[in-house]
Structure formats: structure tokens, C-alpha cells
Image (tube, rainbow, N blue to C red):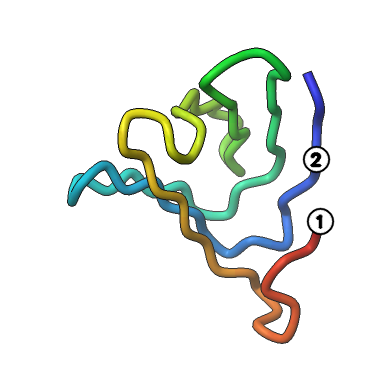
Amino acid sequence: MKKWSIETELWREYDFGGRVYRIDKPKTLFISESGTTHRVLGNNGVVHCVPSPGAFGCVLRWQNIDEDKPVEF
């Protein structure tokens, strides 16, 4: 799995056609090279396994803490 810090994000949301799953203050993003899911480590130590954007109608959105840098990697 590849690993990225996403501590610059204030929050991220996964939208499944109106059903929104929100993670506040995410810390780390883990992406499998072969899967249709990825994992997000939250600030409270909970790991969330979510579909990759585009899979199962999943749309991803987020807001960075520094709005002048909307994307960090």
C-alpha cells in the first residue's frame, strides 16, 4: 500500500448519491494499487475503509486547512 499524509485536510467527505460519509481531521491515506477501496486514518485512531472515488458512485470532496493550498500532493 502507498501512504500519504493528509493532515492538511480539515475534513473529507464521501458522497454516495446523497448519503454523505464525513471524516473530520483525517491524518493518513492508504491506497492499494490493485483494489477498489482505500483506507483513511482519522485523528481519533479509527481507520475507515471506503470505496475509491468513482467506484459504486462514490464522489470525494475535501477542504484543506490552508485554503490557498487546496491540494497538497
Element assignment for label 2: strand
In the rendered view of the protein, which quadrant contains the C terminus? bottom right
- Where residue 67 sits: x, y (%)? 65, 82
| Up-down relation of residue 24 to residue 64 (above or below) | above
Disc 1 versus disc 2: nearer the observer: 1
- Where residue 57 sits: x, y (%)? 31, 38
Q: What amino acid type is highlighted by mark number 2?
A: Trp
Q: Nearer the viewer, residue 17 or 28?
A: 17
| Up-down relation of residue 16 to residue 72 (above or below) | above
- Where residue 33 sits: x, y (%)? 73, 19
* Residue displayed at 58% across by 39% down: 42
Q: What amino acid type is highlighted by mark number 1?
A: Phe
Q: On residue 28, which mark appears?
A: none
* Residue displayed at 45% across by 28% down: 51
| Quarter residue 43 falls in | top right
Element assignment for label 1: loop
- Where residue 69 sits: x, y (%)? 75, 77
**What is the tally of numbered marks visible in this picture?**
2
Question: Marks 2 and 1: in contact by CB < 8 Å?
Answer: yes
Q: On residue 4, which mark appears?
A: 2
| Up-down relation of residue 6 to residue 56 (above or below) | below
Left or right position of 38 against 27: left
Q: Which residue is mark 1?
A: 73
The crowd level at tag 1 (other Cα within 10 Å; few <14, some 14-19, many 20+) is few
| Quarter residue 68 falls in | bottom right
Outermost residue toward the left in this view = 18
The crowd level at tag 2 (other Cα within 10 Å; few <14, some 14-19, many 20+) is few
CA distance separating discs 1 and 2: 8 Å
- Whichever of labels 1 and 2 marks the residue nearer the N terminus, that label is 2
Outermost residue toward the bottom in this view = 68
